Amino acid sequence: MIKKRILYAEDDETLAFLTMDNLVLHDYEVDKFGNGKECLKAFHENEYDICLLDIMMPGMDGFTVAESIRKINEHIPIIFLSAKTLKEDMLKGLRLGADDFLVKPFSMEELILKIEKFISRAKKNAGAPKKKFSIGSFQFDPENLLLSRGDVQVQLTLMETELLKYFMDHKNEVLKREEILRNIWGQDDFFYGRSLNVFISRLRKLFSVDESVKIETLHGVGFKLIIKK
């Protein structure tokens, strides 16, 4: 069986040692870098299943690394591991295309669960039937994480794709906020609620050119994807 390969960027050697030790025990192959430029160079030269990125690193910060990775590969899951606790930093990471954000010190069990979840989802998407959706004047291709309108194509992240597919499976239905969080993120808490808001804002911006598509907020309840035609 081929081991799943992780690109891991962390300049704290003690934390890196402990994290790598746990990941190797769970049968992952890990390439660790303490410098953002070295991390990005490795991504260009190798194939990985998931990226774990610190934010504050010498050479190039994690935000810049993630942004560069997303220009190369929109599919690979990215998780930020950072001591930065400001909600603005977390939201910036998500806007740059990260799929999740863990604040140090984090639980190794939680990290392993998230890695397993994202790699499993990526594998599931790759092997899923090639089903496409029409959303007003848009075409949504979950397998390739694509949302297109005419000749314009937008690459979605894995979490944006999961969220939009969930909305499409329940289009024109009221979805409770906690129901979305549990189905997409696996838990309902404040940070994931903020993450959900970021992803919905991005989807709304993409759909704003088509008046027949709307993601409606039902305050105190949840959301509803409305497709009028």
Image (spheres, rainbow, N blue to C red):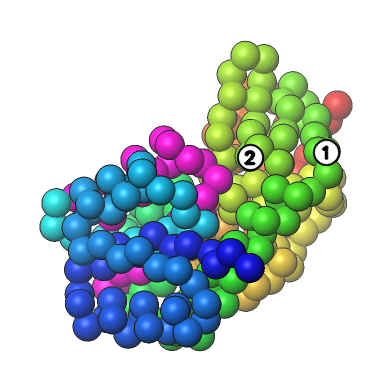
Task: Locate the N terminus by quadrant.
Answer: bottom right
Compare residues 97 and 214 and report the one nearer the observer: 97
Instruction: Identify the residue under disc 1.
Output: 131
Give the residue drawn at x 41%, y 72%. 102
SS label for mark 1:
loop
Q: Secondary structure at mark 2?
A: loop
- Residue 39 position in % (x across, y down): 28, 53
Q: Write the start and end of the magenta stretch as one range.
A: 60-85
User: 218 above or below 96?
Assistant: below
Q: Position of residue 109 (x, y in %)?
A: 51, 85
Q: Quadrant of residue 229?
A: top right
Residue bearing mark 2: 145
Q: From the viewer's perspective, is 195 left or right of 218?
A: left
Mark sitting earlier along the chain (2/1): 1
Q: Is residue 222 magenta?
A: no
- Farthest-out residue, left: 58
Q: Identify residue type, mark 1.
A: Lys
Q: Mark 2 packing: few (<14 Cα in 10 Å), some, or many (20+)? A: some
Tell me: 19 left or right of 136.
left
> Which kind of residue does numbered mark 2 sit on?
Leu
x 80%, y 34%: residue: 132
- Circle on res. 21: none
**Residue 140 image point, x, y percent:** 72, 33
Up-down relation of residue 213 to residue 119 (above or below): above
Q: Is residue 49 left or right of residue 209?
A: left
Q: Nearer the viewer, residue 18 or 108?
A: 18
The residue lying toward the viewer, choosing from 76 and 98, is 76
| Neighbourhood count class around disc 1 (C-alpha, 10 Å): few under 14, some 14–19, many 20 upward | few
In reply to whether residue 76 is colored magenta, the answer given is yes
